Image: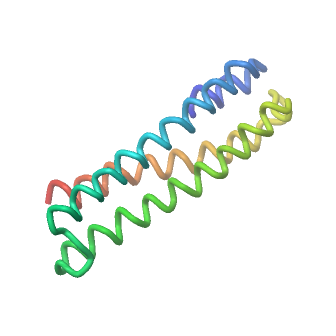
Amino acid sequence: MFSAVRMVHQNRQRMMRRYLTATLILGATFLAVQGSEWVRLVAHGLKLSSGMYGATFYLLIGCHGAHVTAGMIWLACVVIAALGGRYNARNSSGVELCAVYWYFVCAVWPVLFVLVYLM
C-alpha cells in the first residue's frame, strides 16, 4: 500500500494499480488463512462457549477480520476507480485515505497476535 501511494504521487498509474491489486490479494490471503485457522480451532474444540479465552479470541480476531473485510471492499472500490484512471499526482486523496486505513488495520494485527496467541 505504501508503494501504491508512492506510485500515485509519481503519476505511475500502472504500477499504482499493481500495488493496489497486490494489497487486495494479500488481504484476501490473510482472511483465508484466518478462516482456515478458525475451522481448525473449532475442530479442536475452541468455540465461543469454550470459556473466556474462546469468547475473547473470536471477538478480537473476528472484529479484526471484519475490519480487514471492510478495508478490502474499500480497496476494491479504489482499484476499480484506479482502473478508470481516477487517481494521479494531483488527485491522490482516495488512495491516501485508503492507505491510512490499511496502515491502521496492519498496525493492530501485531498487537492482537501478541495478546491472543502469545499470552
> Position of 31 compared to 93: left or right?
left
Residue 58 locus on image (x, y percent): 31, 69
The image quadrant where one finds the N terminus is top right
Rendered image quadrant of residue 3: top right
Q: Is residue 93 left or right of residue 46?
A: right
Q: Is residue 106 above or below residue 10?
A: below
Q: Which residue is at the front of the view, 72 or 47?
A: 47
- Residue depicted at x 65% and y 31%: 5
Which residue is nearer to you in this view: 99 or 45?
A: 45
On-image quarter of the C terminus: bottom left
Between residues 99 and 43, which one lies in front from this camera angle?
43
Identify the residue shown where x is 15% and y is 62%: 44
Image coloring type: rainbow
Q: Is residue 49 above or below residue 71?
A: below
- Residue shown at 77%/36% (left/top)? 92
Q: Nearer the viewer, residue 96 or 23?
A: 23
Say which quarter of the image contains residue 7.
top right
Residue 40 in the image, given as x and y percentages of width and height: 23, 55
Image location (x, y in percent) of residue 116: 23, 60
Q: Residue furthest front?
A: 43
Q: Is residue 111 left or right of residue 92?
A: left
Q: Is residue 7 left or right of residue 106?
A: right
Q: Residue 33: give x, y in percent of width and height.
A: 35, 45
Tally the marks. Answer: 0
